[in-house]
Image (cartoon, helix red, strand yellow):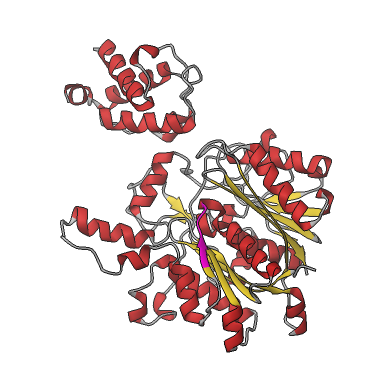
Amino acid sequence: MPEDLTERILDVIAATQKLPRDKLSIDSSFSDLNIDSMDGVNILFALENEFNITIPDEQAKSIRSLRDIVDGVRGLIEGSGQEGVALSS
Amino acid sequence: MRQRAAVTGVGVVSAAGLSCGAFWESLRAGRSAIAPLQCVEPGALRFARGAEVRGFDPLAHFEPKQIDFLDRFAQFAVVAAREAVRDAGIAWTPELRRRAAIVTGSCVGGQSSEDSEFVELYKKNRPRVHPLTIARVMANAGASHISMDLGVTGPCLTVSTACSSSNHAIGQAVWMLRSGIADLVIAGGSEAPFSLGHLKAWEAMRVVSPDTCRPFSRDRKGMILGEGAAMLVLEPLERARARGVRVYGEVCGFGMSADAHHLTQPAKDGARRAMAAALADAGLPPEAVGYINAHGTGTSANDPTECAAIREVFGAHGDRLAVSSTKSMHGHALGAAGALEAAATLLALRDGFLPPTANFTAADPECDLDVIPNKGRAAEVEYALSNSFAFGGLNAVLVFRKA
């Protein structure tokens, strides 16, 4: 259910950033949303908790947009085989 | 005429050495004390290295009963202060004890005491924590224990401005001497941040390097935490000369600023204003400065920002300046960082030898200064700066003069 995963990630980002959900789309960049590096770290923390994943620092450094986040989280969930667990929680 | 602040004693406890002499020998040799962390299980963190103080035996310095009252950061503070006072050859009199002051810096206070007691509460489900927890954890415990240990009864306080704490503390000491409210000040900082909870908080910030600290290098990956303490004995230059004691150098300028910008991102203008204020306080043109002990954390954000600020303050003289980050060797000891770096800067001026930036691999065009890569060098320098820029955007810069 890749679309659901995208929606859940955007929900987490909206909640973390205190932004209206409809302001976010997968094509938003961090600069569009005024997300700075510390905000980015907060988002990664929330996503790690939400999906029970660990996002490596090196991977975190290359993130510039919401699409980068969605792709990265999907990769980590698929890589760890945790999708079923995480998405049913 | 205002009193000039002479440094007549230095004491150090650090990963790079358990005394001032051992510390300076490591720095001169360019030897990094960054090593695999021993305080946590391997794999407990995304990073594995730190600059831990090794071989420090509290029982060599304190009675067993005293140790109950002393967190590791306060132990470091007292041991460094004792060394500094011994080094300065202070002969205490009741009058001097009343006229002596203490200013310490600490960012996180008794971190490991707090961590271990909260483990009792939250993890072991015990209903109570140790009654000395508050007294061990408070950030001023270092200053309080120094005052009790040495019988110093004048002004005594602690400054907590994250990574600028001890530069702010040494600056207060300079002001106390200039204003005449003290005849001697013990000033510096101490820190012991290696508890699992605290390290986890650093891990979450994603600013700690997975390998080592490579300030100004193109492939730098972040900071490396350190611990320890350094204390200086400062007294009016005339008084030091009158009693014939050896003088390491003077703290001749102190400048502060706030970025008013961001809790964690540094701002070039704040750093620039702090350096300019320090030079103005010392009454010096930028061209007088030969060496800067940089804040130089090795993070992606700090190093280019600091280099750009140095360029703005020093202009063309930036090409003739030597700049190094000794954090590459003693780690980033947070509230003790400025004090360790003050010790390094004073010894560099005294010996005419500039410590290197260790672990340097490749130049970064964004850090386009002479950063003394890997190998220290002989250089006679009269004036040097030491920069500290804290989270929260609070900056403090000291100017030192060779004796």
Q: Look at the picture and state if B186 lies above or below A28.
A: below
Horizontal side, residue A72 vs residue A36: left or right: left
Horizontal side, residue B307 vs residue A20: left or right: right
Q: Can you say which quadrant of the picture contains the C terminus of chain B?
A: bottom right
The span shown in magenta is B157-161
Inspect this view and state whether residue B14 appears. no
**Residue B2 spot, x, y in % from top left:** 76, 67
User: Is B36 or B222 nearer to us in this picture?
Assistant: B222
Residue positioned 61% across, 37% down in the render: B267
User: Is B315 or B22 nearer to us in this picture?
Assistant: B315
Residue positioned 48% across, 41% down in the render: B207
**Residue B62 spot, x, y in % from top left:** 41, 80
**Residue B181 spot, x, y in % from top left:** 64, 72
Q: Look at the picture and state if B314 lies above or below A24.
A: below
Horizontal side, residue B298 vs residue B42: left or right: right
Q: How many marks?
A: 0
Q: Main secondary structure of the magenta part?
A: strand
Horizontal side, residue A39 vs residue B98: left or right: left
Q: Per the image, is B282 magenta?
A: no
Inspect this view and state whether residue B45 appears. yes
Q: Look at the picture and state if A65 lies above or below B353.
A: above
Q: Can you say which quadrant of the picture contains the N terminus of chain B?
A: bottom right
Residue positioned 56% across, 43% down in the render: B393
**Residue B53 spot, x, y in % from top left:** 47, 64
Residue positioned 35% across, 21% down in the render: A14
